[in-house]
Amino acid sequence: MKKFLMVLALAGVSVAGMAQSETPATKYSVATNSFWSNWFVTAGFQYGASYSAFERDLDPRLGNGLFEDFRRDMGVSVSIGKWFTPGMGLRTKATVFFNGHNATTKEAKDGEIKFMNIQEQALFNLSNMFCGYSDTRVWNFIPYLGAGYMRNFSGNTNTVGVSFGLLNTWRLGKRVGLQLDLGYNLADYCLFASAKDYGKYPSRTDRYLDAEVGLIFNLGKIGWEKTPDVDAIKALSQSQIDALNAQLTDAQAETDRLQKLTSNHKCPEAKTITVKEVTVAPVSVFFNLGKSKIASRKDLQNVQELANVAKGKKFVVTGYADSKTGSVELNQKLSQQRAEVVADELVKMGVDRSNIEVVAAGGVDTLSPISYNRRAVVMVK
């Protein structure tokens, strides 16, 4: 066991050194991905070392070597999983050992068994959690823990088990990666004994250590989109509104001056001068993926300002969805719902419904990143 821990420590130091050479990733918030995004499958070969309850309780003289023939397990594994955020994911992993041992005797042939381990495991990508998400990071450091079902086919026994370990992944390409998985498993009710031996040992916990080398294949859409910087967009819209308000004030002052000038002028050729109307900038209200509920109520402050500046005017509210997700029919319906929601907010602000025109533009990709297209735009007609 001490040797195994030393191997883990050395592996951690070496890969940490590799990680230091990477360019630091910029931290930013990411948008929620769709259900079909960021799936992966893995396949690999596994080496394991079994430690049975028998050797601890009845015969502690077998020795603790990881590579002894009487405790060597060789197997294959496959898994399927999904990342729900850059830092958290789940995978279902199945391992079958065709050449396993129960570590109850030093005669390897006497202890040969076949067994299976199916685990549901929670993954925690500490590289993304602490260093920021990067879609080009070479190495990821991913501890995990899980629980599941184990079966000894040779002994006809079933049990439950828990696992924890360290998954290391290296990026080989956009859709392919290399993995090194180091795990520790605990099985209740003597996984490595037969059914007739239940209750025979004072201790009822079997263990095995495993090391797996394999490949990772990424499926579907890969990566995470940066969330819209709503505060920056709001600040930009507010600055535009402030500038237009200043222009409107100057224009009104000029109109008053000219009216006063013409009213005091006695010449017949004196004329009234009309100042052009100032156009007010449109305002955007953003939504989350697949939703028609306003993502941030702060966006409505800009809508209120626009309603105050253009009081009595007619408004056009245009809803949009992003064309990268969802069908054409769904995006058309979603853009209509978003426009209606913002129109309802305008009515609450005192705008007459007859002065509001609603337009559904459907799915578009006019803005980048694509999440910026999940919005409704309010403008003065």
Image: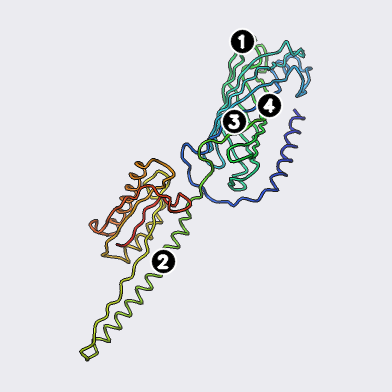
- The residue tagged with tag 4: helix, strand or loop? strand
* Mark 2 to mark 1 CA distance (whole Å): 78 Å
Asked whether the beta carbons under mark 3 and mark 4 sit within 8 Å of each other, the answer is no
* Mark 3 to mark 1 CA distance (whole Å): 33 Å
- The residue tagged with tag 2: helix, strand or loop? helix
29 vs 160, nearest the viewer: 29
Residue 58: quarter of image: top right
Few, some or many residues within 10 Å of mark 3 (<14, 14–19, 20+):
many
Which one is earlier in the sequence, the residue at label 2 or at label 4? 4
From the top left corner, tell me how far across and down residue 322 is, in percent.
41, 47
The residue under label 2 is: 240
The label nearer to you, 3 versus 2, is: 3
The residue under label 1 is: 195
* Mark 1 to mark 4 CA distance (whole Å): 24 Å
The label nearer to you, 2 versus 1, is: 2
- Residue at screen point 61% across, 10% down: 195
Q: Which mark, by number, is residue 88?
A: none
Q: Report the amino acid beneath label 3.
A: Thr
Asked whether the beta carbons under mark 3 and mark 1 sit within 8 Å of each other, the answer is no
- Residue at screen point 71% across, 43% down: 16
Few, some or many residues within 10 Å of mark 4 (<14, 14–19, 20+):
many
- The residue tagged with tag 1: helix, strand or loop? helix
Q: Report the amino acid beneath label 4.
A: Asp
The residue under label 3 is: 42
Residue 233: quarter of image: bottom left
**In the image, residue 343 above or below residue 325:** below
The residue under label 4 is: 210
* Mark 3 to mark 2 CA distance (whole Å): 51 Å
Which one is earlier in the sequence, the residue at label 3 or at label 2? 3
* Mark 3 to mark 4 CA distance (whole Å): 16 Å
- The residue tagged with tag 3: helix, strand or loop? strand
